[in-house]
Image: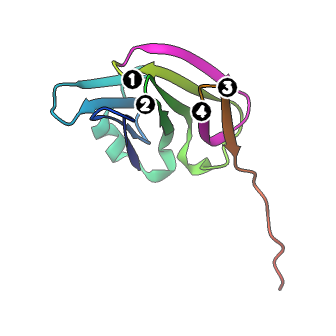
Amino acid sequence: AAGAIKHPFRNDFVCNLLHFNQLNIFSVDRQKNVSISYGEPINIFETLKRPDSELMNYYVSMVPTAEYIYALYVGKPDKQYPYWEGAVEIHVYDWEGQPISKMAIPENIIYFAVDEINKYIYGLKISQFFLPVNP
């Protein structure tokens, strides 16, 4: 799975690929093309050879604002999706790809929203639950 989200005012986009530890920032006119990796870049050809049971989830969602890109980094096995255990991180980059900050989130959120005016991040946590089954 992948996602591409447009800058609120410019013709720039940020793209994540779920099974790769990178974000790509690019412009429609191809004047900007920046790739950001958290750690050593994941080899696409090696990943394509792996069975689904061995895939990892890295950047799972993003929130771009006029100034920053907020990206939710999970770094956990795909087979646990969306019921990851433990903390996740939100990485903040500017639109040139420079790292701004990294926030540890103690909950296993899967989506989030950013309120820059009031300086809040709202996260959505998926709780595992079971429905009773009638025989």
Q: Is residue 125 left or right of residue 135?
A: left
**Percent x, y of residue 38:** 44, 22
CA distance separating discs 1 and 4? 22 Å
Q: Specify the amino acid type for callout 2.
A: Asn
**The disc label shown at residue 114, or none:** 4
Which span is picked out in magenta?
A: 97-114
Q: Identify which amino acid the numbered label 4 is placed on.
A: Val
Q: Nearer the viewer, residue 30 or 37?
A: 30
Amino acid type, residue under disc 3 in the picture = Asn
Amino acid type, label 1: Ser
Q: Is residue 108 in the magenta section?
A: yes
**Circle 3 SS class:** loop
Q: CA distance from mark 3 to mark 4?
A: 9 Å
10, 4: nearer the viewer: 10
Identify the secondary structure beneath mark 1.
strand
Query: How far across and how far down the image is residue 66, in percent?
Result: 43, 27
Asked whether 94 falls inside the magenta stretch, the response is: no
